[in-house]
Image (cartoon, rainbow, N blue to C red):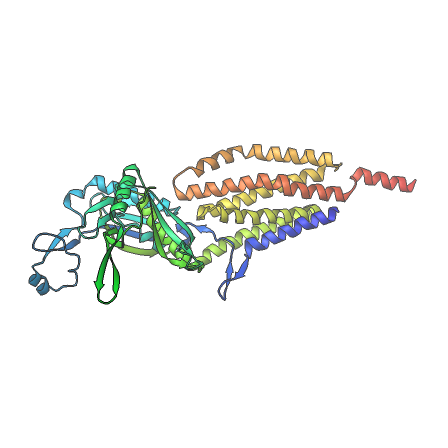
């Protein structure tokens, strides 16, 4: 029974090791995809994207008729056609001179930092050129980088306007929160999933929305006409008349619509895309809605920016150099475990398996806790592996010195080793916790790696290593004195 338990634990360790270092591959659209989460690399290892957001110096062009009213259908007219109709072009700067202040520059920087946090960017550097107002952003390179960049310079100006008069009926000041929702197609026409951008308005905005939705509604006028010849016939015709509103974000029209009913809940749901059952399409809609929600959930930018520079900067550390570091650590671990096996024989083999299991769980833990892997955190990983080796070596050394290895003695040795080890590393634990809260990414990533590593050493060794040692020593049978006494009894 004890052999079965030991074998089960070892097989479990082998399985975890395979998952950690080889991955779990499943077929996805005629290709094999690894379902194990990848590491979150820092900018010093994976490279970075450098973006310069410059103050937009271009103009907005508006076309007005002879009465000074804005014309929405004159964009494609030539200058001669505009002149014939009596229309005039007016050029106004996108950023008026009075808004280009240091206060608005700093406010824009804070809004961009808030958007980066809400968009899930964990590691970034934002700096401001207070003279020109330009904002420099450095962020890690990954599959979401382009999507994030597209939302950085967006002003986020939300408006609901009268489609005919362009009167602003609601704006950002009325928004309380924005979030993404999805569910089944309400019409029942398809079995797909629909993605919504759910906009919740504050108290004043709720009253405005209620008034607007009761005013801008679809109506049907019915006209009855009776004509008498030999027979009397009735002809009914319905003429649909409706007042519409236009919803815009950054002067881009999202939709023009009317309301079927009065909205009294203070919530407005905008459908993004069509109902779909395709996972990739659905994820695209959700990402688009999430980005819009982040923009609307924050203040709109007081200044309009444009992306003037968008560069990918390679890491100074090449892949070959990174591989060399990994191979060096793996080689040192292998040599250390061989020494352990040579010195402590069977018990060394069992604890070597236990050590590999901890290392495998450690790298999986770093993946799923979103710890940023930087050059500094790689050294943190090496330190954690060294600390665990010191613990295992101390434990085996004490067990090897003990004459009696019954369960009671093993428990005492384990507790003493555990207590001695963690008392000695108390200063390290204090420093690690301090590092975790430092804003500088290289130090904080090192601290987080060490924190999770020490926590795993504590939990893993008190459970798995403890169990393996107990099973092995119990399986080993009697102590040295016991074996000597048996031999003497046999001689007698």
- The picture places residue 264, in percent across and down from the top left corner, at 32, 42
- The picture places residue 50, in percent across and down from the top left corner, at 32, 52
Q: At 86% across and 40% down in the image, what residue appears?
A: 486
Q: Quadrant of the C terminus?
A: top right
Q: At 43% across and 41% down in the image, what residue appears?
A: 444
Q: At 47% across and 51% down in the image, what residue appears?
A: 39
* Lateral position of residue 446 relative to residue 263, left or right: right
Number of numbered markers: 0
Q: At 66% across and 40% down in the image, what residue appears?
A: 466
* Lateral position of residue 249 relative to residue 34, left or right: left
Nearer to the camera, 401 or 34? 34
- The picture places residue 88, in percent across and down from the top left corner, at 9, 57
Please tell me whether residue 68 is drawn above or below residue 438 in the rendered image: below
Nearer to the camera, 310 or 376? 310
| Residue 48 seen in the figure | no
- The picture places residue 60, in percent across and down from the top left corner, at 16, 53
- Residue at the front extreme, as displayed: 230
| Residue 351 seen in the figure | yes
- Residue at the right extreme, as displayed: 492
Identify the image quadrant of residue 399. Answer: top right
């Amino acid at each position: 029974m004890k052999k079965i338990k030991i074998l089960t634990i070892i097989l479990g360790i082998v399985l975890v090791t395979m998952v950690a270092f080889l991955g779990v591959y499943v077929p996805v659209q005629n290709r094999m995809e690894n379902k194990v989460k990848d590491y979150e690399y820092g900018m010093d290892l994976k490279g970075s994207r450098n973006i310069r957001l410059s103050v937009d110096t271009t103009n907005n062009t508006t076309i007005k008729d002879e009465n000074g009213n804005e014309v929405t259908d004159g964009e494609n007219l030539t200058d001669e056609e505009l002149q014939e109709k009596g229309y005039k072009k007016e050029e106004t700067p996108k950023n008026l001179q009075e808004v280009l202040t240091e206060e608005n520059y700093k406010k824009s920087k804070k809004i961009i930092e808030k958007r980066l946090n809400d968009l899930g960017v964990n590691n970034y550097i934002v700096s401001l050129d207070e003279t020109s107002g330009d904002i420099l952003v450095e962020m890690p390179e990954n599959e979401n980088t382009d999507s994030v960049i597209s939302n950085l310079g967006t002003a986020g100006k939300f408006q609901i306007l009268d489609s005919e008069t362009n009167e602003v009926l609601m704006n950002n000041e009325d928004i309380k929160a924005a979030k993404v929702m999805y569910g089944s197609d309400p019409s029942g026409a398809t079995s797909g999933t629909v993605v919504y951008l759910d906009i919740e308005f504050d108290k004043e905005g709720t009253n405005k929305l209620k008034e607007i939705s009761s005013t801008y509604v679809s109506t049907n006028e019915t006209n009855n006409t009776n004509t008498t010849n030999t027979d009397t016939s009735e002809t009914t015709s319905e003429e649909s008349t409706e007042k519409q509103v236009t919803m815009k974000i950054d002067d881009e029209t999202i939709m023009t619509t009317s309301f079927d009913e009065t909205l009294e809940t203070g919530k407005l749901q905008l459908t993004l895309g069509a109902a779909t059952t395709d996972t990739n399409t659905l994820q695209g809609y959700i990402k688009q809605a999430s980005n819009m929600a982040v923009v609307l959930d924050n203040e709109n930018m007081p200044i309009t920016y444009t992306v003037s520079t968008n560069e990918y900067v390679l890491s100074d550390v090449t892949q070959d150099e990174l591989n060399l570091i990994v191979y060096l650590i793996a080689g040192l671990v292998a040599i250390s475990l061989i020494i352990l096996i040579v010195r402590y024989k069977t018990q060394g083999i069992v604890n070597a398996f236990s050590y590999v299991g901890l290392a495998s769980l450690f790298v999986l833990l770093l993946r799923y806790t979103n710890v940023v892997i930087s050059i500094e955190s790689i050294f943190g990983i090496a330190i954690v592996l060294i600390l665990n080796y010191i613990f295992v070596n101390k434990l085996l050394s004490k067990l090897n010195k003990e004459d009696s290895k019954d369960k009671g003695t093993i428990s005492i040795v384990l507790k003493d080793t555990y207590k001695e080890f963690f008392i000695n590393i108390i200063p390290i634990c204090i420093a690690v916790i301090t590092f975790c809260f430092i804003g500088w990414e290289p130090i904080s990533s090192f601290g987080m790696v060490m924190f999770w590593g020490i926590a795993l050493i504590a939990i893993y060794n008190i459970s798995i290593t403890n169990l393996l040692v107990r099973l092995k020593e119990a399986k080993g049978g009697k102590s040295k004195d016991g074996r000597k006494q048996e031999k003497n009894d046999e001689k007698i």
